[in-house]
Image (cartoon, helix red, strand yellow):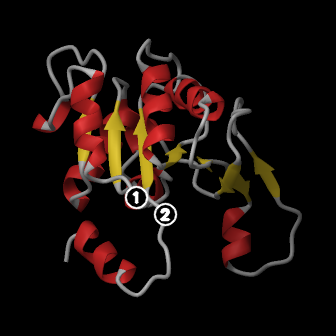
Amino acid sequence: MNVPNAKRQADAGAMRRRRILTVVGSGKTGDPQCAEVGRLAATLGFDLLTGGGRGVMADVSQAFFEASPRHGLIIGIVPATVEPLGAIERQEPRTVDYVLPPGYPNRWVEIAIYTHLPDSGAEGTLRSSRNHINVLSADVIVAFPGQEGTLSEIWLATQYGVPVIAHGTHHGGPPFAIPYAASLDALREFLSSYAG
């Protein structure tokens, strides 16, 4: 069973399940269209989920946070390094160092989900990457241009069957032949069918 079908089955018995829009993109630089996507997501009734860091994640979160009215919260899935993780797995009593990357979580995150998952970038599809959580938690994903980490999230979405659409300037076209929203109106139309 793919992810959307598994979620529909789980949601059938839920009292009220909120809808999550995950936005992925560069963790280094923002995109001029982040603000309009953040405002759109806020008005469509989604909760916004990002990797909780800088670049696209911060820009879309700020626009979502500042939108009025807005109907959701901003969730950040935060990576970290835990040392010594092996000792924790073996239940050895030790002092643990929990190290967050610089800029995590960004100031706009309202609900920070702190993880022990350090891998990203080229290692973004490994089981030790939070990218799986970002994708599996999403009802729909908007993909801005990015590097290896963004591409791994888009790849995971295609494999898990989570709806994903590209937005922004993807040189060479959208990766993995995912749909592309050239305008905010096209994006609104796509996202509206997944809104709560």
Q: Amino acid at mark 2?
A: Arg
Q: Residue at x 27, y 68 (%)?
A: 3
Q: Residue at x 66, y 76 (%)?
A: 89
Q: Earlier in the sequence, mark 1 or mark 2?
A: 2
Q: Is 25 positioned to the left or the right of 190 in the image?
A: right
Secondary element type, mark 2: loop
Q: Is 158 positioned to the left or the right of 32 in the image?
A: left
Question: Residue 78: in sight, yes or no?
Answer: no
Q: What x and y, as percent, mark residue 38?
A: 49, 31
Numbered label tally:
2
Q: What x and y, as percent, mark residue 113?
A: 65, 56
Secondary element type, mark 1: loop
Name the image quarter holding the N terminus.
Answer: bottom left
CB within 8 Å, label 1 to label 2: yes
Q: CA distance from mark 1 to mark 2?
A: 7 Å
Q: Is residue 154 above or below residue 160?
A: above
The numbered disc on residue 196 is: 1
Residue designated by label 2: 18
Check disc 2: other Cα within 10 Å, few if <14, some if 14-19, many if 20+.
few
Q: Nearer the viewer, residue 118 or 196?
A: 196
Q: Is 170 positioned to the left or the right of 141 in the image?
A: left
User: Residue 4 is drawn in which quadrant?
Assistant: bottom left
The numbered disc on residue 51 is: none
Q: Nearer the viewer, residue 57 or 16?
A: 16
Q: Nearer the viewer, mark 1 or mark 2?
A: 1
Check disc 1: other Cα within 10 Å, few if <14, some if 14-19, many if 20+.
some
